[in-house]
Amino acid sequence: MGYSVRPMTADDIPQVSEIDREAFPTEWPPPSFKRELSSSMVRYLVAVDDSRRLTGKPAKPRRGAWESLLARVRHIMGRDNAQDDSVAGKETDFIVGYASIWMMTDESHLTSIAVRQSHRHQGIGEMLLLAVIKLSLQLKARVLTLEVRASNHSAQALYVKYGFKNVGIRRRYYTDNGEDAVIMTTDKLTSPAYQAALRDLEAKYLERHKAPASASG
Ligand SMILES: CC(C)(COP(=O)(O)OP(=O)(O)OC[C@H]1O[C@@H](n2cnc3c(N)ncnc32)[C@H](O)[C@@H]1OP(=O)(O)O)[C@@H](O)C(=O)NCCC(=O)NCCS
């Protein structure tokens, strides 16, 4: 499998925004990736297709005041998926998914994970989760926690596979449709039992997908 995971950079923002809007079209407001990338509490990882490169769209012509205002509104509304000028003309990686964590004291909180719809069911979500767990261990997190929509059975299946357990419900947590969130958490990441399970899962993952997943960490 020709995919790998690396830390996200500012050049990845247009593609990550695109994936975010595709995966979470009703969530409001969209994340401010630029601000979050500069926070010491937040870490973003991206999954990259190693066999494909993109060339950034050419820089847009200079805008007049009216166009500028419209672009600003579109940006605030989260509808501006255009490449930003920083990647114009540059060769960039093709991003197929991303994941983010917030470090809060000794807890790592998985705030988002998403894979392009066209690239799902190929093990990319699992590769990202493995990388998130390793990163959380590097950052000395005791446990990994998250909230997931009660109806999101595919994501819950992925989390259960990696030892997350349901520990509670946040009623009407999602403001778009009033859906409950299931709170999930792992056991202590450094416990011998979790470490053994993780080694086993990673070995099975590599066997199934054959090529080494160069998950950061
Ligand atoms: C959840 C998501 C990241 C999974 O990514 P993916 O690359 O398709 O997942 P993988 O191919 O790596 O699958 C890994 C595991 O996830 C689970 N899974 C993934 N898709 C599933 C589905 N449609 N039904 C049931 N389980 C599923 C399975 O446990 C699977 O392991 P298995 O192959 O041994 O059964 C992806 O579906 C996605 O981007 N969804 C939209 C965004 C989202 O809901 N994110 C979670 C927010 S909390």
Image: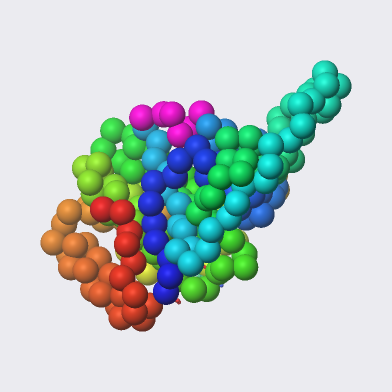
Residue plotted at (33% across, 59% down): 215
Residue 40 appears in the figure: yes
- Residue found at the very far left of the displayed protein: 192
Colour setup of the view: rainbow
Residue plotted at (34% across, 34% down): 104
Residue 156 appears in the figure: no
From this view, report whether residue 203 is shown above or below residue 170. Answer: below
- Residue found at the very far top of the displayed protein: 65
Nearest the viewer among 55 and 33 is 55
> Residue 10, position in %: x, y?
50, 37
> Residue 137, position in %: x, y?
23, 49
Nearest the viewer among 24 and 9 is 9
151 lies left or right of 184: right
Q: How many marks?
A: 0
> Residue 129, position in %: x, y?
39, 59
From this view, report whether residue 160 is shown above or below residue 175. Answer: below
From this view, report whether residue 61 is shown above or below residue 128. Answer: above
61 lies left or right of 107: right
Nearest the viewer among 39 and 164 is 39
Q: Is residue 36 magenta?
A: yes
Magenta segment, which residues? 35-40
Q: Is residue 79 magenta?
A: no
Which quadrant holds the N terminus?
A: bottom left
> Residue 124, position in %: x, y?
46, 66
Residue plotted at (54% across, 50% down): 91
Residue plotted at (42% across, 49% down): 45
